[in-house]
Image (cartoon, rainbow, N blue to C red):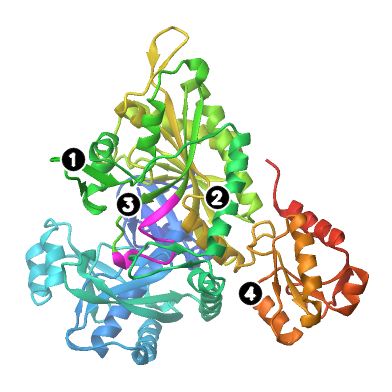
Amino acid sequence: MIKVTLPDGSVKEMAQGVTPMDVAKSISEGLARNVISASYNGTTIETTTTLTTDGTLILYTWNDKEGKKAFWHSTSHVMAQALEELFPGIKLTLGPAIDNGFYYDVDFGDQRITDADFKKIEDRVLEISREKHEFKMRSVSKAEALEVYKNNEYKTELISNLEDGTITFCDHSNFFDLCRGGHIPNTGIIKAMKILSVAGAYWRGDEKNKQLTRVYGISFPKQKDLTDYLELLEEAKRRDHRKLGKELELFHFSQKVGQGLPLWLPKGAALRDRLEQFLKKAQKKAGYEQVVTPHIGMKDLYVTSGHYAKYGADSFQPIHTPAEGEEFLLKPMNCPHHCEIYNARPWSYKDLPKRYAEFGTVYRYEQSGELHGLTRVRGFTQDDAHIFCTPDQLDAEFKNVIDLVLYVFGSLGFENFTAQVSVRDLDNPDKYIGSVENWEKAENAIISAAKDKGLNYVIEAGEAAFYGPKLDFMVKDALGRSWQLGTIQVDYNLPERFELSYKGADDKLHRPVMIHRAPFGSMERFIAILLEHTAGNFPIWLMPEQAIILSLSEKYENYAKKVLDLLENHEIRALIDNRNETIGKKIREAEMNKYPFMLIVGEEEEKNGTISVRQRGQEGKGNISVTIEQFAAMINEEINKTLKQF
């Protein structure tokens, strides 16, 4: 007998050789019908894998992240089979599951896949699926695997890096593939599948290697799920921040300036400024001091911090000056500069905490294939701050930062989020700097603060920064997509590396603890996500223009200007549309350009000293006639609804 421990802590004694499916059936037939994957002692396995030792079992259904991963990875196998049948002679490489679906990288040789091929591939995938082929794992020797794939240089490269005795194939139908495992019981569970797109992808992500064709797909256990997902994709296209950014004239990319280097247009720059002022005001209340650091630094600065060792090879290369041996780097992070600001003078424990804040622009050389609008760029501005405090102050300071992050989210409409405590990967200690003792102190401090603040949090191993653990906020947008926004990190290591100190009450020197925090993360990425979350309908306090004045004819232009002046006196952002167009066309275009309020002025309004107010999206509800003062009160009431107090 073996002891199988379940997630709730209960233990089942089962016969040796039992499978995860047998365990599921022993719990309930309903669970067994829905289980599609499992893990045992942290290793992903099939539901048919025999269990021979004591261990912890987790059963996954479609509703679990790991269940979806197994479902999509299995579908990638079926799609690979269909591709081999429809495009004889192709060479398959890798086909993993991703956050939404899966892909398979394929060398099509002289053949070419187009949109016109998608339907026949999808149809063939569903034909194979309906045949309910079981997925079965089998071990093969290294020599056998190399012989099987002797005409596929991609698979042989993968196999050559594997040890004999660790190589497995997965079989279904008349198809097999090199695979480590993690599949659903059979193909019959796949009821709906769609090829989403094809793109170029270099073998193993290296631009020096051959470019392959990456075929993206997604699949579901119900047709309705696919229909709903495709509708969501269409809505996502309408909300795409690149599309909205162009329509709203917020930002622009120029090939002459360079990939991944956004240019902020006047409206976008004003939007950024309002976000900055919003956070600066809250930071001032919280006791932060603004600092400014240069865009470059000596290479040795980042060698000291550890950033050069971790990122130097993949970042912008050193800048050489006329002085022999002198090298600078474009700033990849702000924290080393802030450490040197702290080091500018000696400190006492009575002076701490010191809270330095900066909207600092940093530069990282992202691969061109990974660049994506504002969400992945090469130059971006972080709402960065670093708190230097005593160990006794750490808990209170960390909780204060949590309060600041929650204030930002609440004021911008991000109400649906979870917190993620990102800790070390204990199996890969070489990824991190610093002592085990310091890491344990930092991780425990974050978990304690998250518990005390009542956050809904999960712990994710391997997601920590190289210098310390962090608390990441995973926010769901209006489409249900999850984004990492806002981060707080505890760091005992950089104070060591930069020899930071303060004089304690015992008159001895001590190391401060460092907290890194960025509620927005980066201005570029935050604005992109906010654009897609709101579809460009920002909170009224953030809108580039809060109202547009529409004159019925040129006769009322002077009154329109008077209205504009009065609105400016009330600090309401507005502009005038005095084009020689019909009022209907002006209203339609104002709606498209997402102005929250349209203020119509004509003979009656001029006579009475009023404006006729139409709110965006309120077609058919009629306009209301109010004075400027009444309208200003409406705007302020709307702002107070959304802009939280800090």
Query: Between residues 587 and 413, which one lies in front from this camera angle?
Result: 587
Q: Amino acid at mark 3?
A: Gln
Tell whether position 372 is magenta: yes
**Callout 4: 10 Å neighbours few (<14), some, many (20+)?**
some
- Residue located beneath label 4 in the image: 593
Q: Which residue is mark 3?
A: 16
Q: Which residue is mark 1?
A: 326
Sequence-first disc among 3 and 2? 3
Q: Identify the image quadrant of residue 255.
A: bottom left
Say left or right for 229 vs 454: left
Q: CA distance from mark 4 to mark 3?
A: 67 Å
**Is 440 a magenta residue?**
no
Residue 47, located in which quarter of the rendered image? bottom left
Give the labeled residue for mark 2.
Answer: 418
Q: Residues within 10 Å of mark 3 (few under 14, many from 20)?
A: some
Of marks 4 and 3, which one's residue comes earlier in the chain?
3
Measured in 3D between alpha carbons, the distance from the residue under mark 4 to the one under mark 2, in whole angstroms, is: 33 Å
Q: Earlier in the sequence, mark 4 or mark 1?
A: 1
Percent x, y of residue 222 = 51, 77
